[in-house]
Image (spheres, rainbow, N blue to C red):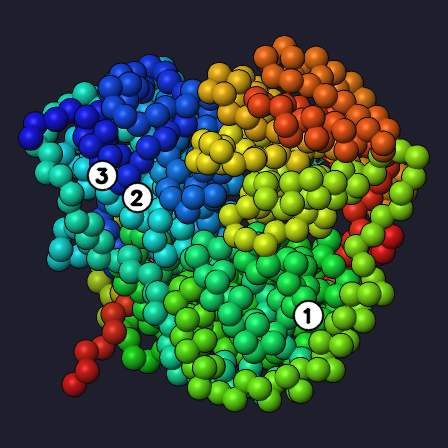
Amino acid sequence: MTEEKHILTMLVDNEPGVLSRIVGLFSGRGFNIESLCVAETIDPHVSRITIVTKANEPLVEQIEKQLRKLINVIKLRDLTGSGSVQREMALICVRAKPENRDEILRIVDIFRCKVVDVGPEYYIIEATGTADKMKALVNLLKPMGIKKIARTGTIALFREPH
Amino acid sequence: MKLTGAQILMEVLKEEGVDSIFGFPGGATIDIHDHLERTDIRHYLVRHEQGAVHAADGFARVTGKVGVALVTSGPGATNAVTGIATAYMDSIPLVIISGQVPTHLIGNDAFQEVDIVGITRPCTKHNYLVPSVEELPRILKEAFHIARSGRPGPVLVDIPKNVQQGTTNFKPKQKVKLKSYNPTYKPNSKQLRKVVDLIMAAKRPVIFAGGGVILSKGAEELTRLARSARIPVTMSLMGLGAFPGSDPLSLGMIGMHGTYRANMSTSECDLLIGIGVRFDDRVTGKTDSFASQAEIVHIDIDPTSIRKNVPVSIPVVGDCKTTLEVINSFLAEEDLDKLTDSRGPWLDQIEQWKQNYKLAYIQEAEIKPQYVVEKLYELTRGDAIITTEVGQNQMWAAQFYHFDRPGYFVTSGGLGTMGFGLPAAIGAQVAFPDALVVDVAGDGSIQMNIQEMATAVQYKLPVKVVILNNCYLGMVRQWQELFYEKRYACTCMDHAPDFVKLAEAFGAVGLRATRPDEVETVLRRGLETPGPVIMDFRVAKEECVYPMVPAGAPITEMLLV
Ligand SMILES: Cc1ncc(C[n+]2csc(CCOP(=O)(O)OP(=O)(O)O)c2C)c(N)n1
Ligand SMILES: [Mg+2]
């Protein structure tokens, strides 16, 4: 059976230890985590966790059931597919030699990124977009020399019905 | 009402109907123990915290109530972990109260501080570190609710010392509100219509019943279903007693040490109805070959159990008892008489397997362990509560003692915890002081929690320990004999204590049998003796448990006597 990426998003109690229950479930049962994002929602008692995992169909069913079984998981949805909006964010510190500066700014423009810090030898670029866009951006910047990179995992929301 | 944390605990325990607690004190529980002494709740002082949890577990298994254990911080809490994991694997409702260092010291590596909530996270149904006395009443109520509802399990509540001493306004009988926890009791009746159609159409149906049937108190409904629709029933180790073992429709236990007819009929059936089971690897063997000709119906209250190990045609999430009630009510509208004919050939085939391949052993000059269990069954007329240790002794108890009712067989199934049987027997005896409670033990396992004999003697709990003493860690030795060319590495236990003298040292009675003709006399004397007794049966050393399915093989590939 083929493994596919699944974006699981869940609302959880915003309490100490809840994240380790979830992460512990994944490590204890040998489930895979590709990325993980957590932050409080509008309700300070509730956080949203988004996990990207790779699994085949029966396994992802098992992962979802195991997550739902945790007392602190209030709601869970699989946001894989076109019904949702998905974004990642990255801060990329790229080497900016004088001969590369124009090219970098062109890329920044095309990808609708922002330069958020400038130094004599580098730019720090803020980028958001889908996982594919991030990958393409990183590939284009690589030849200039990426000094440092910080990336978030995927966050996602279901599109509201029109 | 202004109360301290320790007093609030007493109030909630009373509200929850707790009458017995198994515990061991320390610096972090002094306040709780101090208040406990002034209530009507009986506290049984064990000799090791593992014993406290197993005793609470045994109590819970025979009563269906939530068992309660109380341990101190640090080593007290870590000693409890094996007991908690044992209960978790077998879905036993427990509340474990642990003391913790005061909140301002948490994280400082304080004396006897351990992150027990972190340690027990994967082996509890849920757990709590109580942050303040104000939160205590809610958390305690939730703990009992979570432990006993849905698929039951152990819940740990870690109470820091300053929370025990702090005061707050206590409102009695608070309602539990958990927005994210709502187990599904009521099954989908459309699915059950399909199940009934399958039952009516099947030529070779089998019911496979597990511990979930016992936990949901569904044994009677199961028996009704099997008898009315003429479906033979096999049981997992945890399911023994869910259907009368002496009923002609009983196939006995399934799996690695299951009966020939149970394993064969599961492999050849065209409909397998799993109820309150989780298709553990000791049951299925090689999963590809398991029930490969059958439509599989799986009924369980825990959705994660379904489709975890085997593919299922009809999943049903619901309480076993409730589900069985609905199936029985649907079946009542069907023409059940016609099943008498259609089931005939199948039941004949099963009868043939039964006659040709009985559970058997060969009598020799030495005492055979199976003979001891057989005699025990005969002399107690199946009326004893049997607890077991782990290993061959456990399998022989499962095979040769027959269970007609739920709650009479208490064994560590999922975790296979050596040292479980004696403390569990103590817990069962506390629950039913007048019952005959017998721990069928191995010489290795009994040494793991033998200290609890002191507890039995102190509280005059007349548990009987039947040691099937083969001077070996027999089950491991059996694997070495069969699969490791008889290299008995580290399984010989010939430096055991003299169990008769040991019993006497504890203030109990010790008896010994070395020849087959002494077995009955020793059993009779032991069972008739009023207090706790250890009976040391010197049995054949290299006896093996048969049938045996090698790990990972299809369950039809049985090694037989
Ligand atoms: C705590 C623990 N440690 C190790 C094991 C592995 N184990 C399973 S059966 C067994 C042998 C038990 O020996 P004994 O109690 O003498 O029982 P017998 O098999 O001889 O009847 C062992 C060591 C276990 N189940 N539990
Ligand atoms: Mg032994």
Q: What residue do we see at 30% from left, 43% from top?
A: B144
Place of residue B152 in the rendered image (x, y in percent of width and height, measured from the top left): 40, 50
Place of residue B190 in the rendered image (x, y in percent of width and height, measured from the top left): 39, 83
Q: Which residue is mark 3?
A: B15
- The mark found on residue A88 in the picture is none
Camera-side mark, 3 or 2: 3
Q: Which residue is mark 2?
A: B144
Whether the residue under disc 1 has CB within 8 Å of ligand 1 = no
Place of residue B196 in the rendered image (x, y in percent of width and height, measured from the top left): 49, 82
Query: Three-letter amino acid code at disc 3?
Result: Glu
The residue carrying pointer 1 sits among few (fewer than 14), some (14 to 19) or many (20 or more) residues within 10 Å by Cα, namely: many
Q: Horizontally, is B435 left or right of B472 in the view?
A: left
The residue carrying pointer 2 sits among few (fewer than 14), some (14 to 19) or many (20 or more) residues within 10 Å by Cα, namely: many
Q: Chain of mark 1?
A: B
Query: Three-letter amino acid code at disc 2?
Result: Phe
Q: Which residue is mark 1?
A: B266
Q: CA distance from mark 1 to mark 3?
A: 45 Å
The residue carrying pointer 3 sits among few (fewer than 14), some (14 to 19) or many (20 or more) residues within 10 Å by Cα, namely: few
